[in-house]
Image (spheres, coloured by chain):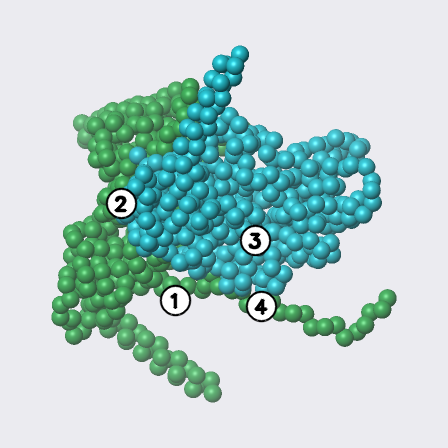
Chain colours: A cyan, B green
Amino acid sequence: MRNCALRLTSLSLLLAASVAYSQEETIAIKAGEILTISGAPVRAGVILIRGGKIADLGADVVIPPDARIMDASNAVVMPGLVDASAIAPVRGDRNEQSNEMTPSLRISSGLDPQSKTLKRILQNGCTTLCVMPGGENLIGGLGVVVKTVGPLSNINEMILKEDAGLKIVMGSDATVGNRIPRQEPPTDFYFRRPTTTMAVAWMLRKCFFDAQQYAASAREEDADLKVIAAALKGVIPIRVNVRRAIDIRTALRIADEYRFRLVLDECTEGYKVADELAKKEVPVVLGPFYYYPTGSSQYDEGREVNWNNAGLLVRAGVKVAIASNGQDESIGLLTAAAFAVRHGMPRAEALRSITLVPAQILRVADRVGSLEKGKDADLLILSGDPLAVTSRIQRVILNGKTVYQMD
Amino acid sequence: MRFNFRTTFILVSLVVCASGALGFAGPVRKKLAIQAGRIITLAGPDIQDGLILVEDRIIKTVGQVAEIPWDAEVIEAKDKVVMPGFVLAHSSSGLDAPNENVPEVPFLSTFDSIDPIDPYFEDSLRDGVVAMLVLPGNNTLLGGTGTVVKPYGRIVEAMLIKRYTGLMISLQPPVQSSQQYEAGSWSYKSTVTTNRMGHMQHLRRYMAELKEYLEQYEQRKKDAQEQGKPFDEEIDPRKQPMIDLSNRKLTAFIYCDKAADVAKAIEIQETYNFNAVLVLGPEGYKAVDLIRSKKLPVILHPNLIVWETNEQTHAEEMKVVPLIFHKAGVKFAFQTDTSQYGRRYLWHQAATAVRYGMERTEALKSITLYPAQFIGVDDRFGSIESGKEASLLFLTGDPLEAQTWVDRVMIGGEIVYDKAKDVRLKKLLEKPKPQETLPKSTDQNTD
């Protein structure tokens, strides 16, 4: 018996030691150029990675003798990309149809850690992404921030931040297809509200009012109102999906009325209200990008496209993140940023808009978004300038481990 | 007063007529000297600080800075990269409707359908395209003949480079309802085919009937000659394009939606002795070996990166389509579409291929020289060399960089696009003018 216990202890000690050893392995990346994003770029620098974190970085870092050296002296190293609004990897529909307001639903329940799209996303350099519920419910539910590590058996290993945002949809998207079925009583299961933009605003106001009442009184537990109340207090970021300038203004007005802070998604006509957004310090998550309205009802709204939306918003002083927001994963955030620069966004801002800014908006900037001591070792090794179409991602490192390597 | 006006009018018209007559009397050979920072000729090595001399729309010499003829108009582009204009070898945009709703309409021409006002052409010019083959769509078996145009001009005649170029054959069975067929049943022998068996059969039958028709025609001609009668029967104009295809006066552009269609395309091409260019669908790369062995030119699908999924293991593998063809030594041309960000630019397609390892010059030729060869305008377009038309792009930087813009476009020695004067682009990039605020209402409505 005692022997057994001893054995067990020694075994566990051994295990612990091996784990500790593997975690303590130091990787030294010799980089031709390090784009830290948070600070100035470093020419011919070294990044030390230990235990999945960045232990040190800079031009004059001493490489420990036991470090495994990764040579990237002809390459550019930058932080892993952060996609503040992605659709993959979720199994099934992202829109719950039983109700038009489903604030307490968590998209993380639908996450698929086996998703094959993870590989595609990784290959495009995205190491952190925020998955939000779909865009057909007025209040869709709670989003989640995940690392694109996978395939995994345990979903919790992916999750960086649960309840990372409450999805609200304004404009006509929340009303698409919502009609009273003919010759059916309005109590029918398929009857969904709202059917007008007026009702969109009214239902949101009512919901926020109820949540405030709920928070003030000691009523019995209400999962939905609890989430809304937490969002109004600022515990959960409110992400409002809007395109038209008129809807952006409505969102700002309601945010003023109920005194909450919000993040705007898509924001196609954001350039028209750039000054107001800057004054109110409202960050925006742009994307998907398109040159002209496609003719489908969803993008017809907000049809006054300006290719330089990102640039004009940044110049007005708005915090801009560029996200894929459902765009084909073969495009990648780097291409989106490269085109933002083509159309007038300053280069440094474009690089921040796919790394640090989305990390800040998602409130995970203490872990990801830039190359800094103590942050997660999520980084990309590129063959050249990240914003050049001809540059290729050679290697993706996530939590200190190589998860993609160019063949 | 009236008299005065009249005299002025007559005087002015006289002057105009005189100058016009002079213009016609002696050919004024317009000379241009283009001073370029860098010339990507695609006919030889790049030239730094080069000079292109153009005479009467045609490139005379290309080389290092030399003496500029005294009578040449100098076009200064010392900070620009000058390269041949892009050529698009396959497009079905800019038409009111690309597909007729009956399967055998080889006698139709896109010339009758091109809409010069379509913003597609304006965009194409802005993106550096100087020549494009507009073909019917992929939903018709024998869709009709194409038209090579420049994306510039208010009427199709002004846009025209070459009529009656290429005939579209689609091996993809039409995606249409049978009702649509019935509605369009004015055509002879229109039958519904919705699968590949029937679709191919349709084509074979058409060709067999064409052969029969020609034999009978020849017989009638022979009979008439034997009988000493005059023979003035003309060939059925509806059949003429297919006859020209058989005589290799036209090139077949065969759309292969699936990789398996490539084998069918080759069967057709060999059986009926056609000149053929393959227009590939997204999975066309799977037939690369077959295409290589037959040495057929290829137009790639706009989707250049394909993820192949193993049906058993669900493991995914990335396929870079242009690289596969490049490594196999198959000549190809890129094409564009507007479905996705970036893909609408030919330079972006070439840059994507270069990212994954394609050779730079080859990638550039795949958007200039090769498509020009495929559509038969390489005597005028596709490279900068003596004897070709001066259809050039003036770029602000390297053609494969996202930050590079087309600054000016010259087609046939004439500047037809200037970014500085592009009002619509300005509107798409610049801050909108502040909206007019409504004046405050003076009457107080207290109701």
Label 4, label 3: how far apart the Cα atoms are: 21 Å
Q: Residue at x 60, y 59 (%)?
A: A281
Residue where numbered disc 2 is placed: B363
List x then y, in percent, for residue A81: 45, 45
User: Looking at the picture, do discs 1 and 2 lie on one chain?
Assistant: yes
Crowdedness near tag 2: few (<14), some (14–19) or many (≥20) residues, C-alpha within 10 Å: many
List x then y, in percent, for residue B157: 35, 54
Residue where numbered disc 1 is placed: B420
List x then y, in percent, for residue A288: 51, 46
Could you tell whether B3 is left or right of B12 in the image? right
Label 3, label 2: how far apart the Cα atoms are: 37 Å
> Which residue is the extreme one toward the top?
A1
- Of marks 4 and 3, the one in the foreground: 3
Name the chain under label 1.
B
Vertical placement of residue B238 versus A336, above or below: above
- Kindly indicate the quadrant of the structure image that contains residue A144: top right
Label 1, label 3: how far apart the Cα atoms are: 31 Å
Give the residue type that dot 1 points to: Ala
Residue where numbered disc 4 is placed: B434
